[in-house]
Amino acid sequence: MTTIDAVEFRVLLEHERRRVQDTLDHLAGENPANMQDELVELGGWGADNHPGDTASVTFERELDEGLGEGCQQQLAQIERALARLDEGTYGTCERCGKPIAEERLRARPWATLCIDDQRLADRG
């Protein structure tokens, strides 16, 4: 990979890192410290609390947690790709050692496998 390419992909990865981190920050800001605080925001905590409110809060919290976990994983992949840029191994398939297609890297800059090896990995 040329120096110009490395600079371009570093910019792509850093932009993606900011986007994912912004998403994580938003998710963290959306959820109060505990579910009781969130139910208070909906209209009170206590005997008059409707089970539907509790179910809605639980569902939304679990959804946000799942999104947060996905963002954490993607952030780790981005950090790994940036480290590979620094090491000079970015754009090389970790499994077969062949170059990863530029089109794949543009679509998924944190990719570590060429498309053929990724398909094999997805099959299990």
Image: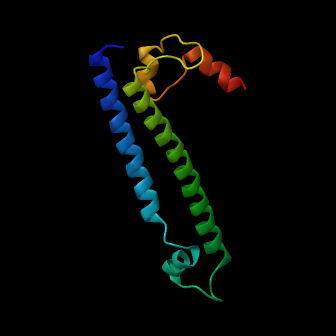
Image: 122 above or below 47: above
- Residue at the far bottom in the pictured view: 47
124 on left or right of 22: right
Residue 48 lies in what quarter of the image?
A: bottom right
118 on left or right of 20: right
Image: 9 above or below 41: above
Residue 73 lies in what quarter of the image?
A: top right
Q: Quadrant of the N terminus?
A: top left
Residue at image position (31%, 18%) is 5
Residue at image position (67%, 76%) is 51
Residue at image position (57%, 73%) is 35
- Say how many tags the image has: 0
- Residue at the far right in the pictured view: 124
Q: Which color scheme did the rendering employ for the protein? A: rainbow
Residue 84 lies in what quarter of the image?
A: top left
Q: Could you say where residue 31 lies in the image, as x and y percent from the top left?
A: 49, 66
Q: Nearer the viewer, residue 13 or 60?
A: 13
Q: Quadrant of the C terminus?
A: top right
Image: 25 above or below 11: below
- Residue at the far front in the pictured view: 87
Q: Nearer the viewer, residue 9 or 108?
A: 9
Q: Could you say where residue 61 lies in the image, as x and y percent from the top left?
A: 57, 63
Residue at image position (59%, 13%) is 96
Q: Could you say where residue 38 lies in the image, as x and y percent from the top left?
A: 52, 75
Q: Could you say where residue 117 lies in the image, as x and y percent from the top left?
A: 61, 17
